[in-house]
Amino acid sequence: MAQTVTPILSVLPTRGLVDEKFKVALENLPPRFPVTLHSLHQSEDKDYWEAFGYYVSDDRGRVTVSQDASLGGTYTGAEPMGLLWSMRPVPGSRTGLRLRKMDVQSPMVVLISAYKGHVFEGFREQPPMASAVTERWYMAPGVQRIDIRERGVKGTIFIPQGPGPFPGVLDMWGGGGGLVEYRSALLASHGFVSMALDYLSFETFKTHNECLSYFEKVFSIIQQHPQVIKDRVGICGLSLGATVTLTMAAYCKSISPRCCVCISGSHVFPSGVSFAEVFQFKEMDMGKARLDEQKRVIWRDMILPIPTDPQRKVAMGRIKCPLLLVNGDDDQNWATVESAEDMAKMMRAAGNDHLLTTLTYHDAGHLIEPPYTPHFRASNFIVQHSKQKVVMLWGGQTKPHADAQEDSWEKILAFLRQHLYPCPSSSLPQAKL
Amino acid sequence: METNLWRLLLSVQPSRGLVDEKFSVRVQNAPPAHPLTMHALLHSEDGDTWEAFGHYVTDSGGDVNVSEDPSLGGTYDGVEPMGLLWSLRPAPGSRPGLRFRKRDAQTPMQVRLSVYQGHQSEGFMDRAVLASVMVERWYMAPGVRRVNITEGGVTGTLFLPPGPGPFPGLMDLWGGGGGLVEYRPALLASHGFASLALDYLKQADVKNEYFEDAYRVLQQHPQVCKNRIGLVGLSFGSSVALKMSVYSNVIQVRKCLHTSCLTCTELNQKKTRYNEENQVIWRDLLLPVPTDLSKKVDVGRLQCPLLLVVGEDDQNWPVPESADDMREMMEGAGNSHLLTVLSYPRAGHLIEPPYSPHCRAGTFMAAVIALWGGEVAPHSRAQEDAWRKTLDFLRENLYCSAD
């Protein structure tokens, strides 16, 4: 009887946090045997995502993904986490998809399989040699999730395990809107009380002052929480959320964030001069929006050239806390690199540039998210004010973008810890990483 | 104004692990050269509380790394990455004779790891904690399926690994305590073996046919490789399994693994002893090992590889003596090349999957407190080493060799 090949596939840890690395290994193959390692995930929207890499077993019949080079597939080279970050919708899927976990209380479940030979399609039609299931969690065990519906504010607070109190982070997402919880859940898993906020459904952004008082109220909700250390609250914002973050830090009188993280953001008001108009997008100079050859929308030129009129941008000289900027230089959605340069200029002139640290990632796009989640160069987007459905070009190339997500997340966590976790040896908060 | 000058960061990776996975426990952001106590707390399904602790001093960076730094005292000492789990013992004031066993294999053990100021040895529930995290320890990997088996008069639970299969099979036979013990087969399935936990002590008089029926059920399962089946036994289950593998015409096992096994089946009740704590020592009941072949399993007739795991401080059964006798019999019969013996000094009778609490003496059949033997640290090391070698043995014999 012919020898049947039954390899042993292991994924450790079997249940990890989304930002934890895993080790995928195959044993008990014949030596020099070609295999394909494949990952499969079904999203909450029921779409299927997959990634795969081609390997050849060594003389002992083993494949160790963290060390061996993938010879082809959706990623190449020695990439321990390639089976996650290079995932893309399976052939035949709907277009313009973006993978985001909306229910953070359950894990992402990923099926990892080993196939004979180097396969590039039809994975569902043939049985694999072996499979393993791994869970990827945004919430560590014991992290609490609490709905916030008070004083007109809609959000979710995540509280770490333990006696507390803890430092706090207000987590601001972008112009896509909705209540996006996963980054907050992950921040809580790292020891920060974190509040995710749905601020675009707040209907009454009429005046500049109404906006400021809304965000002051939001900040105070997290600051006054019994589990939060009052003078150790920071703000983290992505895209439009970054602009909001800068505005809060510069103009809100009763707020003093201990530090701010701005990912893919700009200090330029996209339209006109008022904070309120930031949310209304009314005056946005849509004339400068472009379409690429695949009719995907490019917004990056809309704030270019960076205005010299100080009324059209946040007064960076008023920022009093350490500020970390994280940008991708292939950002097609917002001119973040140019903005960062201008912010540095303004802060140098004002004498507070010692507070500024800028990280710029080559060939990364706009959506710099927690690591090991897939990159999408473009995806479906509903423009808030017009409800128009477009395909938005975010930019970035998969591998550099994945590297940027991994590196920036580590640095964001280190920055938040440094400034928000009281340290025995520190007296003054330090500005630079 | 801040009342705390500093706040600790406690992290455990992975926060959700398999029971036999190592974890890494780190404390950061404390002052340098600062005394701290790492503490573990576990509530059993019966409502008992188990705890472990180690005393540490932070390094010059204000960090403690349990995998690399020594515990200076507590329920374990020295550099012990998993000491907070294997040295768990019943909290002061607990009922006597407790043994930690998870009945529900589908939910995790939940261990609370905490950091306390200074070097504490008691009164943990009354002290303020500096930081705390919950850690899950699972017997079942994601994707493992649990199937109730009630066919052909056989009662058991089958655990199937994820994937298309078919998989090598294992029949898992527990000890004289009886009942359906699922956690080890669940863990074995998490390592790629279709594992059947068998409830065989329900009737006073269990017939051989019951085991043969169970074996057939396993063998005929569509996801099990028919000719890649092994037997795993602990204590009384080992003896049963050994008997089956030698004498049964139905059961043709690929390999056997036995922990704390005996060949002899006759008991001399008069030889029961008690130690100074009134715990029952049964090891002499089966000594001396008889020379009469009719009184023991004739292992000279065994045809498959056999792994014996022996605790040299076994106070329950004379396992070391039995192992010696088995080796002698097999050398005489010319099949000793099939035998591997793992013998652990100062380990006791209950050699279980690693990082679970050690039980030197425990309630048996709700009647007496049996002395199992073993000392905490050597027994725990034995569990860790034996489990790794067990998995290697199972893989080698059930996954690797040609048909």
Image: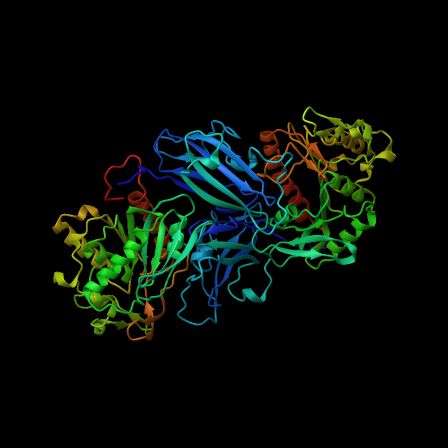
Specify whether residue A38 is in view. Answer: no
Q: Is residue A356 above or below residue A38?
A: above
Q: In the rendering, at what x and y percent does residue B317 appear?
A: 74, 32
Q: Is residue A115 above or below residue B358?
A: below
Q: In the rendering, at what x and y percent does residue A294 appear?
A: 34, 73
From the viewer's side, name the closer residue of B279 and B198: B279
Give the quadrant of residue A157: bottom left
From the viewer's side, name the closer residue of B190 and B129: B129
For the point 31% across and 40% down, which residue is it?
A422
For the N terminus of chain B, the quadrant is top left
For the point 35% across and 55% down, which residue is it?
A195
Q: In the rendering, at what x and y percent does residue A248 appear?
A: 23, 57
Q: In the rendering, at what x and y percent does residue B340 appear?
A: 70, 35
From the viewer's side, name the closer residue of A81 and B156: B156
Specify whether residue B136 is in view. Answer: yes
From the viewer's side, name the closer residue of A427 and A410: A427
Report whether B170 appears left or right of B110: right
